[in-house]
Amino acid sequence: MEKILTAILMVGITVTGFSQSKVKEKDIIGEWKLIIDIDREDIEDEIEDEDNWIARSFARAVSGFALDIVEEIDIKMDFRKDGEVKISIDIFGSHETEYATWSINKDGALEIDDDWRDDDDDNGSSRSKFSNDVDVWMMDGKRLIAYDKSHRGSLKQQEVYMVKR
């Protein structure tokens, strides 16, 4: 009986530890900064595990270049009450503003629509700019965490999150 009680408590603690909060409109309205949280040390450790020295050298050069680019990207999202989100992107001194739509699904997760229009697009037409890599966002304390949703509905946390400005 004691083992069963311990097992039930452990499962309860584990489920509680991994639960995310539902997104509420009042919590997301405003400006957020997108953070791409890629750990250089994890990448270096994976590269060092590679047996082939040529592959290791190539991977080190490519990952360093890619990480340097990621560090230069500044993305802000301004969520508005009308279901629109203004996306401001600054990279290497160039600025671009895009618009998308957002909604909260029945599970309480934030979804950002893939079709958005460019400020420079005179006719206001929509065109697809995002891939469908990040499907939903869930609250974790004061952060919005990105998750990929599998075809079976399971969520996999990504290395991307937003913090309110």
Image: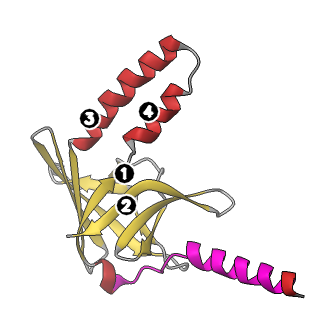
For marks 4 and 2, give the CA distance. Answer: 22 Å
- Crowding at mark 3 (Cα within 10 Å: few <14, some 14-19, many 20+): few
The span from disc 3 to disc 2 (Cα, nearest Å) is: 19 Å
Q: Are there few (<14), some (14-19), or many (20+) residues within 10 Å of tag 4?
A: some
Q: In which quarter of the image is residue 18?
A: bottom right
- Which numbered disc covers residue 68? 3
Give the alpha-carbon distance from disc 3 to disc 4, as whole Å: 14 Å
- Occupied quadrant, residue 107: bottom right
Q: Name the residue type under label 2.
A: Tyr
Q: Is residue 118 magenta?
A: no
Q: Where is residue 58 in the image (x, y as percent from the top left)?
A: 43, 17
Q: Nearer the viewer, residue 81 or 165?
A: 165
Q: Which residue is under mark 4? A: 44
The answer to whether residue 5 is magenta is yes
Q: Check disc 1 and report the residue beneath it.
A: 37
* Disc 3 + disc 4, Cβ < 8 Å: no
Q: Which residue is drawn at 42% across and 65% down?
A: 145
Left or right of 160? Residue 34 is left
Where disc 3 sits, the SS reads helix
Name the front one of labels 4 and 2: 4
* Sequence order check, earlier mark of 1 and 4: 1
Q: Is the magenta stretch mostly helix, strand or loop?
A: helix
- Of labels 3 and 2, earlier in sequence is 3
x and y percentages locating residue 143 in the rendered image? 36, 70
Checking the image for residue 161, the label placed there is: 2
First to last magenta residue range: 4-25
